[in-house]
Amino acid sequence: MPPRLTSLADDARIAFDNLADRASSLVNPTVRLGVTGLSRSGKTVFISSLVHNLLHGGRLPLFEPVQSGRVSAVRLEPQPDDAVPRFQYEDHIRALVKDRIWPDSTRAISELRITLDYQSASGWNRLFSPGRLSIDIVDYPGEWLLDLPLLGKDYRTFSEETMALAQTGVRSSLSQGWLALTRAADINAGADEMIARELATAFADYLKACKTDERSLSTLPPGRLLLPGDLDGSPALTFAPLALPPDGRSDRGSLWAMMERRYEAYKSVVVKPFFREHFARLDRQIVLVDALQAMNRGPEAVQDLERALTDVLACFRPGTNSLLSSLLGRRIDRVLVAATKADHLHHESHDRLDALTRRLVDRAIARIGMAGAGIDVMALASVRATREASVKRDGHDLPVIVGTPMAGETIAGERFDGQRKTAIFPGDLPEDPEGLFDRMLSSEAGGTLPEVNVVRFRPPHLEETGSGIKLSVPHIRLDRAMQFLFGDRLA
């Protein structure tokens, strides 16, 4: 079950916000779409491409309202939440289209409103609907989502689970320095700010080491220790798990009591406001994952991604919204888990990436015992940075992808300058995801995974029309994602 806020004041405020949103939607129908992702999965690129394709008439054959010609106008409008930073769409699309660089990753929450004028497919609906839908896109770091389960854990549980996980697999070597400091700390001694800061810094360094591209681990709460922002150095972020005895309570004024108090402050100051003010108001959600990067890093990264997805999906309560549900707690009625960077594979492997990601999600759903209604999975590329081709090798046609590797990328010992195109064989994903997971978990097989060449490519060069207008950003299956996430609201 998702974490629940026990404060009556929190519950009352959530109910008030949801009622206000409902009242506003009667005048201006709106869907609030949450966009998040795990470890460099491409949230900023997804939003930028989605908006660009809607504004510039992109190829969206599977997005029925556009394909049927029922959408008459699309425009950006001022966002409704004045206290939330605006998603800087113009800056990000300039980086993608003009500079051909990937925009900076999400480090804080932001929001953007895009409004579509349309004609309903139903004559009855045309009598009562204003033919207008606003989509409020709420962009937030995946690390914040992984913090929500902390609301249901006390400090002892958090410490025990975090320390147990830190002693498994590759984490055991990455956590040695922090664990040594933790075990040496006298938890019953008087609270010492310098010791608390030393432990918090060592703990944050361990989390950062897990997140690097070389490791690509995903389960890394508390997320604000990785993205502190304006809370950097505050007591609410200066804490760490401790090696606690199996029973007993902290002494007043002790290091244990200090860390416990700061952990509770983290939940109160950081996690609860995000849940109350943003997450609890969402209608739809997309969770982006870089499954290819995890597979490229090995079985442990894949298993950690599955663990993260279990924690993520436990935060959602898919179901149908109603006026009553808006009073008691809004439901996110559709959740899409999307494996990004499908353009790094030949199209023959796109459905296989679908199947592998679905296998991860199904296992996560089974672990938390929730029904899969309202949840879908797909592979996509928000921006297609490659094209497909074939080369002759030993008398056979070999499918390859062609693109411009980013400066500094190395392939077979050759270092690229960011200007020259090249063709690579990306590797094949297995047709049977069950067999892959069986091999991955088999000690006899050594936990083997298929070899997939993950190369970072520059964004594509976009051609211009005769009037000098840039064409829309190319993509793979972005239209399918749109149809699932809000196509029904334009029916």
Image (tube, rainbow, N blue to C red):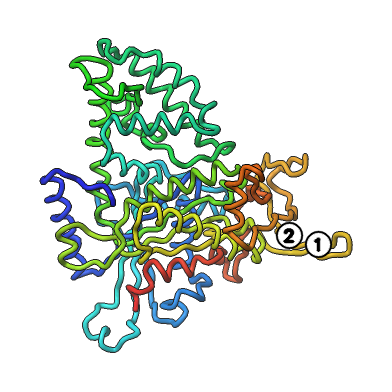
Residue farthest toward the right in the current orientation of the protein: 395
* Residue at 32% across, 28% down: 237
Q: Nearer the viewer, residue 387 or 314?
A: 314
Q: Amino acid at mark 2?
A: Val
Q: Nearer the viewer, residue 363 or 141?
A: 363
Residue farthest toward the bottom in the current orientation of the protein: 123
* Residue at 25% across, 77% down: 130
Q: Earlier in the sequence, mark 2 or mark 1?
A: 1
Distance, label 2 to label 1, CA atoms, is 7 Å
Judged left or right of residue 173, residue 197 is: left
Up/down of 100 relative to 251, above or below: below
* Residue at 23% across, 22% down: 248
Q: What is the quadrant of the C terminus in the image?
A: bottom left
Residue occupied by mark 1:
391
Secondary structure at numbered mark 1: strand
Residue 309, image x, y percentages: 43, 50
Judged left or right of residue 409, residue 175 is: left
Residue 392, image x, y percentages: 84, 62
| CB contact under 8 Å: marks 2 and 1 | yes
Secondary structure at numbered mark 2: strand
Residue occupied by mark 2:
400
Q: Amino acid at mark 1?
A: Val
Judged left or right of residue 168, residue 459 is: right
